[in-house]
Amino acid sequence: MRIAIAAAGRFHVLDLARELHALGHRVRFYSYVPRSRARSFGLPAECHVSLMPFTSPAIIWQRLAPGFLPRLRERIMYAALNYAAILRLRRCDVFICMSGIYLEAARFARRRYGARLWVERGSRHILVQDGILAPIVGAERPNHLTVRRELAGYEMADRIVVPSLQVEESFAAMHNLHPKLFRNPYGVDLGMFPTRSSKKNSRANCATFRRDVVSAKRLRLAGKGSEQRRRSAFDACRRDRRFAFPEAWPPFCPSRSGRAI
């Protein structure tokens, strides 16, 4: 099967491209990730299609001046990614893309090649996500462009791929979309998270880490992120008796942006 996978950066779909290639499919991965970096994650060079020449102005803009006209930069990035993908797209039977990012290129793949469209959505339904963030003062909510593109992608997709049950449940009220859902958990390679700095011993360290976790009576947990009170892994870990927390947890720790972490 000929499969096109379109992303901006790496995301989990680079790993998806690698695994589909290993299963014998003809895969092309469209992204601005440099080929050398894609190869470091195991993606064969023949699967990689660079979109960097088209997107480099927006990437530089994002890196050097992220706060300068962000909505205009977002529009330019969407346009550059879709235009580049359309120019470089080859015949495919399935077009897999990140939700909200690829819309025009997905339509082109269906119109030109009759490709089936699989949209990857890692977070909850965009309207549910916005509803969670709306009551939080200072929270960065999705803008109208993002919402419009997300909703259009859901409607257009033959399949909406989600990673977890809680994401799937956020689509439950949308009766026209729920039948399209396909739940495909990401999985974890512990070899990518060594417990020591030495890369040479990373897999041995992971084996040690797994043994320690299984045998430990009490574990210590550190976390980082924004709006930790609203979207907190600590709430889930609190139910595990191996984790010990003070009564008032997590504490309020102001970050550089002034939000709770």
Image (cartoon, rainbow, N blue to C red):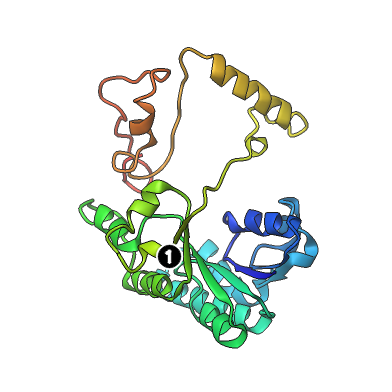
Q: Quadrant of the C terminus?
A: top left
Above or below 50: residue 217: above
Type of amino acid under label 1: Lys
- Viewer-proximal residue among 162 and 61: 162
- Viewer-proximal residue among 213 and 179: 179
Residue at the left extreme, as displayed: 135
Dot 1 corresponds to which residue? 180
Measuring 69% from the left and 58% from the top, which residue is drawn there? 20
Residue 25 visible in this rendered orientation of the protein: yes
Residue 94 x %, y %: 61, 72
Residue 205 x %, y %: 68, 25
Give left or right: position of 35 versus 106.
Answer: right
Measuring 71% from the left and 31% from the top, which residue is drawn there? 202
Give left or right: position of 120 versus 142.
Answer: right
Give left or right: position of 136 versus 16.
Answer: left
SS state under label 1: helix
